[in-house]
Image: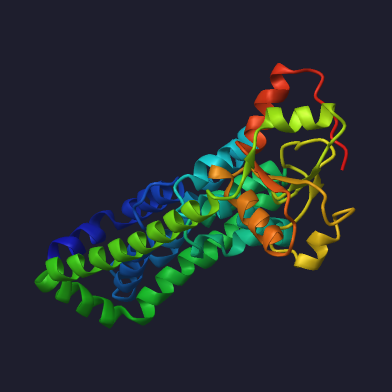
Amino acid sequence: MRELQQLLEQQGLLLVFLNVLLEQLGLPIPAFPLLILVGALAMQGLISLPEALALAVLACVIADSVWNLAGRRHGSKLLRTICKLSLSQDTCIRSGLNVYASTGPKALLVSRFLPGAGALFTAMAGMHRTSWLVFWAYTGMGALIWAGTGLFIGLVFSDTVGDVLAWLSQYGSIGFAVVLGALALFIGFKFVKRRLLVRRTAKVPRITVQELAERHHSGQSPLVLDVRSMTPTMEEGIPGALAVSLEAPIEELLGQLTHPGQDVVIYCACPKELSAAILAEKLKAHGVEHCWALQGGLEAWQAHSAIEEPEPQLQS
């Protein structure tokens, strides 16, 4: 413990800046515990609290600006890359877009407290072309709240932090094993839950893009539902498709049908067509017999459209 304290006293400010910067850029090295430690040392007068806070905020703003710029340039492709790290990839983008669409840049005030949301929301700010001044104002305030909270906890509980460090120095291996075990159980639970969902929804019938195009050309166009979260920055979807929400009341979804026996094709932009398959399950459970998920989703449609031009206009 003494060696750690000496390192923090000598290089604490540099460590705060680097740790926060790397974490906010996406590396799995949590900075919040370090902020708490620095707050505890600041209470003892061993490190400058204002300087630590300023460097932490600066690191956050720099990292967020990088994500913002990447969001402006790469759009939803970047969101899919970010969400590949999620155990719920199919809901990551949809839920993130829903939150940002309803709150706007205000989401940046609390995004750092939500696991995985920091990069997601800052990239969305870039996709929405949020002005840089507004973005910096909200992300700077969010960074101030987040870093200030960590440092404040360390100030208030400085004695407790010292006791915890002393305990870790004596029983650190046991505590580390317990934390790793709990984390492994949580990841295992989420993994099994997702695998069961994938296995269940795999039973939902799929229709290929080619089959959908053939139905259109034969004059038997089905009702096409777009289950993505629709925002002004989303990629253009299938022409003629109706945007619906996966969380919409079943009465609202059934109201989109012109007659009970109408064919329905649902698509999304998610792995294994999960969102589309979940909605298809929901409709089938309420009497919609002819319902398919579009195999490959939006990506498959875009690939097909790039080959066959002009792109057919689907009628709902």
Residue drawn at the location 18% of the way across and 65% of the way down: 177
Residue 127 placement: quadrant: top right
Q: What is the x, y in percent for residue 152?
A: 43, 74
Q: What is the x, y in percent for residue 74?
A: 61, 33
As drawn, which residue projects farthest toward the left? Answer: 170
In this view of the protein, can residue 47 be seen by the observer?
no
**Residue 47 vertical placement versus 291 (above, below):** below
Quadrant where the C terminus sits is top right
Q: Please indicate whether residue 306 sits to the left or right of residue 161 in the image.
A: right
Residue drawn at the location 46% of the way across and 64% of the way down: 147
Residue drawn at the location 68% of the way across and 46% of the way down: 292
In this view of the protein, can residue 4 be seen by the observer?
yes
Quadrant where the N terminus sits is bottom left
Viewer-closest of 178 and 163: 178
Viewer-closest of 241 and 176: 241
Viewer-closest of 308 and 181: 308
Residue 296 placement: quadrant: top right
